[in-house]
Amino acid sequence: MSAFSMMIFSGWFGCRTVGEDSAVEIERRPDDDGVIAEPSAETALRDIDQDGFLEDVDCDDWNPNIHPDAEEILNNKDDDCDGFVDADGRHGGRLQFEAVAIYQGEPYAFTQVCDADILRVRGQVEMLVTCVIDQTQERADQLLGSTLTVTANENFVFEDNGDTSAVFVSVGGETEWDATGVTNWTWSSWEDNQSNTLDVQVRLDALHLDIWINGTLQRMAE
Ligand SMILES: [Ca+2]
Ligand SMILES: [Ca+2]
Ligand SMILES: [Ca+2]
């Protein structure tokens, strides 16, 4: 092969090589883009606990007693998959307030309607009752003050009733006082009808003062 022929052959071979590389590169580009994804495998929903509810709606697919049609019971679990554990949630409304106070040996009775707010989260309860005292009641200003506040909190889960200490204060009357008492409340109404209401019974005892707070609160929208 002459030197000239070698140049032509080399030149032709070189061009051929580059051409092949380019062609390969161009041909691979669409694949590299990965635009055409493989069809995803069928992800069949399972019903692991065989309770009739698939795992996408069954909030505990390992427990056949927990599903959207289950009954919510006091067990520290969200049995019916509505996002609320037992009677959890914020409950609000108005409660009836009655009090008897002894002043200089004389009993005085008071009635009142008070605003109430109870927040229950996984069994832990915080309660706030605020009573703006009706000052037309005899000696109300002296014995109850202008605003009476009851606060309580308790961490209980399974019990359907509980005792807890409460703090209640009177603000602004001639006689101001701080005291502690005991609250009792019940979840019985909620258990009976699984409604969004909650019975509340609070009893506070202090020196020369007894207070009862009763009523039903409504679960508030989140
Ligand atoms: Ca299931
Ligand atoms: Ca629930
Ligand atoms: Ca429950």
Image: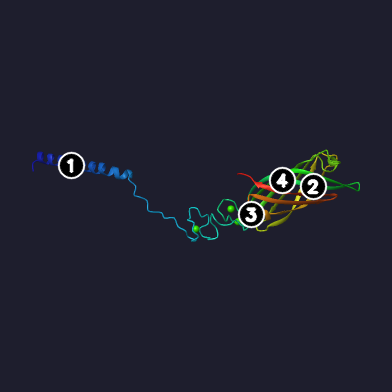
Q: Are marks 3 and 4 in contact (CB under 8 Å)?
A: no
Question: In terms of depth relative to the viewer, which is nearer, 88 or 164?
Answer: 88
Instruction: Say if 132 sits above or below 88 in the image.
Output: above
* Comes first in the chain, label 2 or label 3: 2
Instruction: Say if 192 sits above or below 116 in the image.
Output: below
Label 3: element kind: helix
- Give how far apart the Cα atoms at labels 3 and 4 are: 25 Å
Q: Is mark 1 within 8 Å of ligand 1?
A: no
Label 2: element kind: strand
Q: Which residue is mark 3?
A: 193
Quadrant (top left/top right/bottom left/bottom right) for the C terminus? top right
Q: Which residue is mark 1?
A: 16
Residue 98: assigned label = 2
| Callout 1 amino acid | Arg
- Give how far apart the Cα atoms at labels 1 and 3 are: 85 Å
Can you name the residue that lies furthest to the right here? 104
Label 1: element kind: helix
Q: Which residue is mark 4?
A: 128
Pointer 4: residues within 10 angstroms few (<14), some, or many (20+)? some
| Callout 3 amino acid | Asn
Q: How is the image coloured?
A: rainbow
| x and y percentages locating residue 215 in the rendered image | 72, 48
Image point (80%, 43%), residue name: 170
Mark 2 or 3: the one toward you: 3
Whether residue 83 sits left or right of residue 201 in the image: it is left
Quadrant (top left/top right/bottom left/bottom right) for the N terminus? top left
